[in-house]
Image (tube, grey):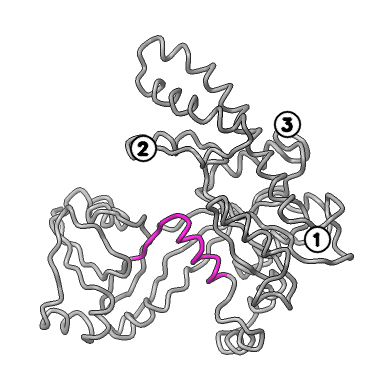
């Protein structure tokens, strides 16, 4: 399992350029005019993880299979999108299908690239998009509550739960605050996600800066970072122009280029790391001579549920998970060394998989 992240923002902030770089394709046309992207472009990328390569080397795995992340490049939003302006309706529908939002903000000055609002102010841009999403959510809440009334009168419990959550979100949205600010109990989490409110989705602000500011950011990105910290959102600084350049290089050239720019890692790596933290995701591994493979799960996932990511039969017939911590697998030279040192554990159905665990599942067919 990976996760599906929508790349959103105003027109001409660098969304499609970033998408092209991250997916190493030219699938998304990048041009200097609004609504260049109309249909959403979808691309999958490998999630870089140095641990996987190291595990594969120890186990002499023939194949190395990273986990994957899906990016969706969504059409640029404009003021009035909640009322259908521009490509508003399509934009909003595409966001609903994503688990998280990567909100690209223009944090660079360039007279040759037009700004739909005629100025460079990423915080104001973020507020414009957030306002449109809140207005769309408020409209959706009002319509849904009206539609649920008859079901509630007939005793439909699911409709009652939905109505209760929507009623709790309504005053927040009416006050100009996103739905993600609502505290939702664990037993309501599934129903809450099912409502697909746009402002309930976690947000990662992507500050698109000029090349010279890629390492340290600039005044614009600092303002965005402060806004993100205040709202509990994630924030990462990326130069889409640099990412587009390094996307065309091989690994050796890439490392040399990043070093010359004063960057420890590529923007994709930082974006994924920030996304994992935002969504509370973890990675476990299956390792053997045939293949070494990474799997993404929500942090705190039980062993049977983790097994189910591979195949539903693994979860249904789960017996136990033979578990080796990543550090033990590496320091003891692999599975056999971990066994001999007593570092392989047998875990049952209540075990919560830890990030980096190397697992082998036993199950009934």
Q: Which residue is mark 2?
A: 185
Give the residue displayed 21% in from the left and 73% down from the top: 324
Q: Which residue is mark 3?
A: 83
Density class for disc 2 (Cα within 10 Å; few <14, some 14-19, many ≥20) is: few
Percent position (x, y) of residue 347?
15, 61
Density class for disc 3 (Cα within 10 Å; few <14, some 14-19, many ≥20) is: some
Give the residue displayed 36% in from the left and 65% down from the top: 283
Quadrant for residue 157, please give it: top left
Q: Determine which of the numbered discs, if any, sits on residue 31 in the image.
A: 1
Magenta range is 268-283
Please identify the quadrant where the N terminus is shown.
bottom left
Percent position (x, y) of residue 250?
59, 84
Percent position (x, y) of residue 58?
29, 85
Give the left or right position of residue 338, taking residue 125 as reference: left
Quadrant for residue 296, please give it: bottom left
Name the foreground residue: 74 vs 62.
74
């Amino acid at each position: 399992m990976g996760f599906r992240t929508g790349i959103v923002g105003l027109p001409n902030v660098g969304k499609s350029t970033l998408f092209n770089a991250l997916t190493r394709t030219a699938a998304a046309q990048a041009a200097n005019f609004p609504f260049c992207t109309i249909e959403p472009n979808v691309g999958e990328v490998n999630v870089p993880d140095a641990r996987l390569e190291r595990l594969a080397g120890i186990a002499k795995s023939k194949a190395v299979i990273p986990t994957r992340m899906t990016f969706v490049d969504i059409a640029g939003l404009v003021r009035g999108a909640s009322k259908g302006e521009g490509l508003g309706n399509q934009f909003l529908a595409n966001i609903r299908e994503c688990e998280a939002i990567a909100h690209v903000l223009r944090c660079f000055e360039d007279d040759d690239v037009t700004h739909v609002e005629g100025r460079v102010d990423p915080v104001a841009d973020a507020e414009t998009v957030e306002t449109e999403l809140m207005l769309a959510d408020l409209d959706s809440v009002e319509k849904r509550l009206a539609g649920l009334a008859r079901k509630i009168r007939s005793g439909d419990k699911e409709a009652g739960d939905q109505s209760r959550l929507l009623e709790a979100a309504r005053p927040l949205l009416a006050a100009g605050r996103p739905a993600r600010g609502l505290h939702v109990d664990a037993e309501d989490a599934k129903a809450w996600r099912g409502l697909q409110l746009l402002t309930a989705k976690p947000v990662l602000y992507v500050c698109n800066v000029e090349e010279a500011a890629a390492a340290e950011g600039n005044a614009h990105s600092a303002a965005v970072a402060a806004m993100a910290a205040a709202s509990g959102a994630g924030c990462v600084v990326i130069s889409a122009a640099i990412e587009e350049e390094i996307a065309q290089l091989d690994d050796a050239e890439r490392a040399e280029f990043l070093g010359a720019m004063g960057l420890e890692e590529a923007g994709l790596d930082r974006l994924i790391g920030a996304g994992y933290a935002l969504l509370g995701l973890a990675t476990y591994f299956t390792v053997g001579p045939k293949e070494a493979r990474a799997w993404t799960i929500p942090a705190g996932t039980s062993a049977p549920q983790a097994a189910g990511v591979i195949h539903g039969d693994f979860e249904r017939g789960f017996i136990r998970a033979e578990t080796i911590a990543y550090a033990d697998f590496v320091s003891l030279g692999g599975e056999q060394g971990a066994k001999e040192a007593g570092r392989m554990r047998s875990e049952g159905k209540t075990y919560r998989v830890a990030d980096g665990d190397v697992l082998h599942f036993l199950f009934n067919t």
